[in-house]
Image (spheres, helix red, strand yellow):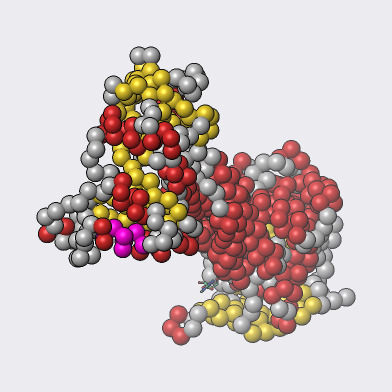
């Protein structure tokens, strides 16, 4: 008996038991698809979160004013304002050689309007160095410069969402918008950073610090200072320089009770990456279990098959089927079922992962496809061979008497 | 001329201890080429046990068995499957066709396990189905055929590989009188073509078609006679 004949007998066996074969294929399909889809979703989450964080700039420290629930904060009686002088002090290259720039930041929630259309957005008042530090690029028009800050010009750079809301298809550069009663001239439009589903990085506007303070926020404490380090390797050095300068300027003796806080973008990024890759592993493990369950399903069905078809095996042996022929038939059945199930699972997963799942774009990992398919076929062979071997070893008379 | 079947002191014991059953107690039997032998005997006398040993489906507890000059006792599993495939055609009381598989595919099976090519299999299986009068039922599955038709498919399957020995364990036990005579006529035809047949039956009228009848009582041959034919 050659391979083609064995294959044909096996295929005929599958065709003769369509419902059972269909259910087996379904089990494997779900297992394989689950592995690929869940890993892709986990992977997509990781990449979107990291991309989001990276779009905020990777070499930056954010110095925030306030205590934000640090232990010991209640003990403080006096809060020193975070000031432009603080930001300037951080740029002293002798004391802080690892700081490339420090941009003071104030933000104002404002209602902006253009020719009767209004839109609420947050306006950031800052210095031009902010653009580079926060990885904000202008796609059309231009940035504002230092002279705009010095003369408090009412120039503004707006994000893509603000453009869409206020202008639609009209080119906004050179147009006037009015925010909380103050007219601004749009000088540039920011490149889109995309939204992460929760917050929209494009719903923003950036204007000179002095202008925003003059017209919108008044001269209160800065909200934060965005510090850009000289390189990604210099993050830790920059952080300790910032601590020592600000502790000195704010007369802080107890370092557990500062009136400001530093958020390190690099630390944040690695923490988030760690969390999301843990998520991927977790999802993958859940999926792997479902694949295993699919495999046990195959064994179970093959066992049932063999029991249910013991008589058939007896008949085949009585008319001269060798052990190899019977073994071949059942192995072909198991393998074909798991290959079909695996291939259908891959196909199904590839279709499903083309769509977004809860705002996450799944990213298929080729390794997960190969692994899921390979494992499903191996499971078919491995779990199929046990009942197949049992079937092939039966004495014909025992098999024939089976009822 | 070597006999087709040569049995010497065949015994078969089922089980052990209290449940031990002595199904065969020492059978000596020789069947020559072209013989048509009927085995009779009360229920439980050991007929099927003897038939299964002759058909190499089961092995004897002791004794010596030669089929067509081949020493069956010394064969291993794969040798036995070759003997079953080439030397023996089996017809069962309960038909034993493979379910959900067409008549043609059922009849092809012995040839398939022998390694005969697809085209030749088709031709021979179609011819065998024609010979049992089922040329128009080749693509029917067993559950779409009457009992008599199923048994004729089984006869075609037993014939198609042209075995030296045809074994039939109560082939008409489940059939009405019309189908019974159809199947017996087929066996007669094959006997006339010179094939060796061993058949178990309970009915004298069926046994009368054979040219030799042996009767078993409690695992022993009690009579062995030629019929008038
Ligand atoms: N697998 C088995 N295990 C134990 N005992 C068995 C087995 N098969 C048959 N026997 C016993 O062996 C004896 C002979 O059985 P066998 O089937 O050969 O009878 P038989 O002549 O074919 O009867 P029937 O005419 O009813 O078919 C019986 O007593 C039976 O109970
Ligand atoms: Mg019997």
- Residue drawn at x 26%, y 61% is A248
- Residue drawn at x 66%, y 50% is A12
- Residue drawn at x 58%, y 57% is A367
- Depth check, front residue: A38 or B175: A38
- Quarter holding the C terminus of chain B is bottom right
State which quadrant residue A167 falls in: top left
- Quarter holding the N terminus of chain B is bottom right
Pinpoint residue B74: horizontal percent, then vertical percent.
73, 82
Q: Residue furthest right?
A: B1
- Residue drawn at x 38%, y 36% is A150
- Depth check, front residue: A126 or A232: A126
- Please name the predominant secondary structure of the magenta segment in the image: helix
Give yes or no for residue A220 being in the magenta stretch: no
Classify residue A70 as left or right of residue A50: left
State which quadrant residue A121 falls in: top left
Pinpoint residue B123: horizontal percent, then vertical percent.
83, 47
State which quadrant residue B35 falls in: bottom right
- Depth check, front residue: B138 or B68: B138
- Depth check, front residue: B42 or B131: B131
Q: Which residues are magenta?
A: A241-247
Pinpoint residue B211: horizontal percent, then vertical percent.
76, 63
Residue A17 shows up from this direction:
no
């Amino acid at each position: 008996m050659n391979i083609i004949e064995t294959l044909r007998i096996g295929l005929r066996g599958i065709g003769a038991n369509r419902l059972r074969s269909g259910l087996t294929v379904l089990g494997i399909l779900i297992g394989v698809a689950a592995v690929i889809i869940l890993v892709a979703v986990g992977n997509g989450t990781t990449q979107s979160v990291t991309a989001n964080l990276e779009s905020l700039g990777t070499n930056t420290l954010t110095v925030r004013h306030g205590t934000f629930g640090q232990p010991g904060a209640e003990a403080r009686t006096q809060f020193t304002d975070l000031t432009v002088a603080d930001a300037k002090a951080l740029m002293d290259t002798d004391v802080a050689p690892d700081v490339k720039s420090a941009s003071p930041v104030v933000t104002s929630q404002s209602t902006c309007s253009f020719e009767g259309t209004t839109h609420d957005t947050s306006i950031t008042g800052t210095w031009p160095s902010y653009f580079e530090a926060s990885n904000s690029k202008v796609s059309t028009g231009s940035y504002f410069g230092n002279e705009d800050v010095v003369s408090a010009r009412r120039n503004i750079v707006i994000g893509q969402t603000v453009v869409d809301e206020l202008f639609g298809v009209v080119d906004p550069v050179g147009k006037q918008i009015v925010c909380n009663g103050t007219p601004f001239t749009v000088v540039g439009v920011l490149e889109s950073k995309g939204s992460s589903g929760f917050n929209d990085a494009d719903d923003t506007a950036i204007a000179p610090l002095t202008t925003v303070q003059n017209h919108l926020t008044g001269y209160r404490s800065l909200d934060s200072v965005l510090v850009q380090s000289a390189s990604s390797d210099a993050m830790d050095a920059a952080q300790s320089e910032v601590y020592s300068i600000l502790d000195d300027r704010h007369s802080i003796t107890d370092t557990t009770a500062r009136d400001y806080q530093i958020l390190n973008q690099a630390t944040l990024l690695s923490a988030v990456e760690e969390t999301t890759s843990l998520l991927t592993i977790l999802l993958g493990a859940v999926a792997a279990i479902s694949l295993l369950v699919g495999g046990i399903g195959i064994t179970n069905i093959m066992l049932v098959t063999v029991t249910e078809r013991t008589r058939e095996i007896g008949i085949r042996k009585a008319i001269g089927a060798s052990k190899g022929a019977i073994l071949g038939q059942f192995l072909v059945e198991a393998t074909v079922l798991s290959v079909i199930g695996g291939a259908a699972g891959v196909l199904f997963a590839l279709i499903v992962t083309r769509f977004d799942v809860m705002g996450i774009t799944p990213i298929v990992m080729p390794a997960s496809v190969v692994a899921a398919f390979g494992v499903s076929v191996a499971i078919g062979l491995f779990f199929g061979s046990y009942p197949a071997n049992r079937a092939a070893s039966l004495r014909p008379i025992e098999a024939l008497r089976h009822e | 001329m070597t006999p087709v079947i040569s049995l010497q002191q065949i015994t078969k014991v089922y089980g052990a201890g209290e449940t031990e059953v002595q199904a065969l107690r020492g059978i000596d039997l020789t069947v020559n080429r072209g013989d048509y032998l009927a085995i009779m005997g009360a229920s439980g006398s050991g007929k099927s046990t003897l038939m299964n040993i002759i058909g190499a489906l089961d092995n004897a507890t002791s004794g010596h068995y030669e089929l067509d000059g081949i020493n069956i006792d010394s064969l291993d599993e794969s040798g036995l499957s070759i003997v079953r495939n080439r030397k023996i055609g089996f017809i069962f009381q309960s038909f034993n066709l493979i379910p959900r598989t067409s008549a043609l595919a059922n009849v092809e099976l012995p040839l398939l396990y022998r390694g005969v090519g697809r085209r030749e299999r088709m031709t021979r299986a179609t011819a065998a189905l024609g010979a049992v009068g089922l040329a128009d039922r080749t693509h029917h599955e067993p559950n779409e055929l009457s009992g008599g038709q199923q048994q004729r498919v089984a006869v075609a399957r037993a014939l198609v590989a042209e075995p030296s020995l045809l074994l039939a364990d109560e082939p008409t036990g489940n059939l009405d009188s019309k189908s019974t005579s159809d199947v017996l006529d087929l066996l007669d035809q094959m006997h006339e073509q010179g094939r060796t047949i061993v058949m178990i039956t309970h009915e004298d009228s069926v046994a009368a078609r054979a040219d030799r009848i042996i009767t078993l009582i409690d695992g022993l041959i009690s009579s062995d006679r030629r019929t008038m034919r």
